[in-house]
Amino acid sequence: MALESCLLLLILFLLFVETRTQPNQCGEIHLDSQLSPTSNLLSWLSPSGHFAFGFYPQGNGFAIGIWLIGQPDNTVVWTANRDDPPVSSDATIHFSKEGKLRLRTGQGYEKLIANVSVSDSASMLDSGNFVLYSDCNIIWQSIDFPTDTILGGQSLTQSQELVSSVSSSNHSSGRFLLRMQTDGNLVAYPRNSAALPNDAYWASDTANNVGLNLSLNHQGHLFMNIYKSEPQVHSFASSSYSCENSTTIFRATLDADGIFRLYSHCFESKTSWSVHVEWSALNNQCDVYGFCDFNSYCSGTGTNYECSCYPGFVFNDPNEKFSGCYRNASESFCAGSKEGRKYHVTGIENLLFERDPYSAQELEEEKCRLSCLEDCHCDVALFMDAKCEKYTFPIRYGRESKTIKSTAFFKEETNPGQKIIIDSKKSLIMFLAIIFCSIAILCSGIAISTFFVYRDRAFLYEKLSEIISLTGEFTLQSFSYDELEKATDGFREELGRGSIGAVYKGKINGGEKTVAIKRLEKVLDRGEKNFQAEITIIGQTYHRNLVRLLGFCFDHSRRFLVYEYLKNGTLADLLFTAERRPVWKERMRIALDIARGILYLHEECVACIIHGNITPQNILMDDSWIAKISDFGLSKLLYPDKVRSSMALLSHSRGHLAPEWQNTALISIKADIYSFGVVLLEIICCRSSIKADVSTEDEMILSRWAYQCFVAGQLDMLLKDEHVEYESLERMVKIGLWCVQSDPALRPSIKNVILMLEGSEDIPNPPSLAPVLITP
């Protein structure tokens, strides 16, 4: 008996010693383990053999992720570093002796797969979760970093999101996202949008709740936990398919087509599964905003859909028709109209798209069609509910609607193949026009000389108005100095004073119309002829985001311009002194208004106009709070044979001046891009570009401070106490920082700025900023 007791004690002692000499490892994957695409060990399996972690084929190489093993294809449920390019066959996954999980390539490149300080073992679990342990505690797990899928037992917590894959074979980040928002709503957006309410194409409608998360349990119940006065459950779906007591695995995936679906996988044999769709957030593919990209529309129902281009457009990629379309024309309708080209409109019934018209009025359907045809700025008019709305391209979220009656009229060129014939006829017409104009100019010169000698001043102004109305597309009214003095009651009420001169409030047409009258005090005296030429160009410009010029006065040294009156003041008043700070969505709309106005000046009007003085003080707000740019065209116009102009006379705004004004560099339209970038940052932060009363010296110059906050990942400091979705804020700040680059070549064009503001272009991180010079 004593001998048996001794043997028992000896065995227990040996077991204790063996236990103390073994490392504390809770996972079956040990340190210094390795995977390779070309070896027998290319993945680590879960105990049941249903899930695997490791290399899987993608494109011409391999990606790293987790997949559900099955036939005929594996189902990828998670991808590591998903937007990195595929690796070659010489890559390895190494779980190092130091406890680091790394990807290594044959070229010596290394990247962490799991960002942890130290671990001692790992496991691929039957739940589809890959975990790292330290002293038997989970310190990292794949379910904390979801890609496009959540599995049974997994939750999507607040501020987390699912991002669709590009396709079933390419698991890089795709075109759609599903976000668990902090306001309690689960919302689906196109990824290239600003994630504003009008960008959402599906939502859980669970806003104004706290502590929410989306959960999928092992029984296939997809639900949200809602906490109001007491915990509640908002259910989306529960599995109804019977797998006859076989293994069932559930997953909820934001698919590549943008639709959130719940799937069940029933185990039938060793590697074979049957897959069933248990629930779908949307049943109609065309309900997904942006599924058919810019300038195209989705038609059909269910999965029987088709992407089509608008009339006059062709596909960006005929092999991927959802990628959007571009207009098969090199010139705008306004430019074509001046060359005598003919246009017609094509109507499409029951069409809807994102609605942000530049003009809307009550019109009959036929008059709506004619109105777009006659307006060279109109690309498409939408007639709906006895209302005519006019738009410019690009247009997104196009789709057919079977429930809403509407007609969209698209403008396109008639017989574009006849351009060569038209050009040859145009040469003859131009020759005859030159001869006729020469005679007309000679006669006009004699007539004007006679008027100056024998007629009084009032008759002179009447003839001058007639001349300008003949040369421009819009009639400008000519005023005498006495008329303007009477209209302003002796220039009594001054609205403001800018770099060019003072602005006064007045009334014309018998006191029925209120106008703003600008006295030109600092314009070079280059004679009446040049003055007429410049105001003629200004009179020809018309856009919803430009202040309209109504008339002029030329009285020797006294010169005035008469503009429409906008009672809501300047953007500077709204941003810096108003009691109510404009909300984020309003500010982003204002920024887009300004950019569209600049686009018209740079690319769409009669001649390219460099503004040279874009500041919040020169941007006015109309009755509908639409931003309109003022003081355009007062600088020398940028004609094709003159790159640098004398605009320096107009550019004295501290902080908004492009660096090239400080030296002899050529001045181009990129100078306006710089000024717009400064204004955009001011709109974002609701503060001026240069501010002395700040807590730190770093905050004095807004562009430098914005860059420092961007690099530090602390953009919320720019907004103080205002809450804005970080992704939207980051996008806008990056646009502003690209615009204020000291090298004009690095600044984007205004067209690209608009695409970035609309969310249709990805924005790389901007380079560092050069020191800012402040004009005294």
Image (cartoon, rainbow, N blue to C red):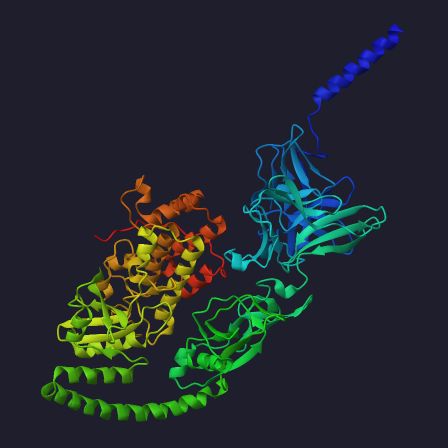
**Relative to residue 192, is residue 471 drawn left or right?**
left
Where's residue 243, x and y in %? Answer: 83, 50
Q: How many marks?
A: 0
668, above or below 18, in the image: below
Q: Nearer the viewer, residue 231 or 724?
A: 231
Where's residue 659, x and y in %? Answer: 29, 56
- The quarter of the picture where the N terminus appears is top right
Can see residue 499? no
**Relative to residue 367, is residue 570 drawn left or right?**
left
Q: Residue at x 31, y 93 (%)?
A: 432
Can see residue 380? yes
Q: Residue at x 31, y 47 (%)?
A: 701
Where's residue 759, x and y in %? Answer: 49, 59
**Relative to residue 565, is residue 600 drawn left or right?**
right
Q: Residue at x 53, y 81 (%)?
A: 346
Please identify the residue farthest to the right as the structure is shown. 1
Q: Nearer the viewer, residue 185 or 216?
A: 185
Where's residue 453, x and y in %? Answer: 9, 87
Q: Quadrant of residue 721?
A: top left
Q: Quadrant of residue 120?
A: top right
Q: Nearer the viewer, residue 302 or 138?
A: 302
Q: Residue at x 40, y 78 (%)?
A: 334
493, above or below 38, in the image: below
**Relative to residue 7, is residue 403 drawn left or right?**
left
Please identify the residue farthest to the left as the structure is shown. 453
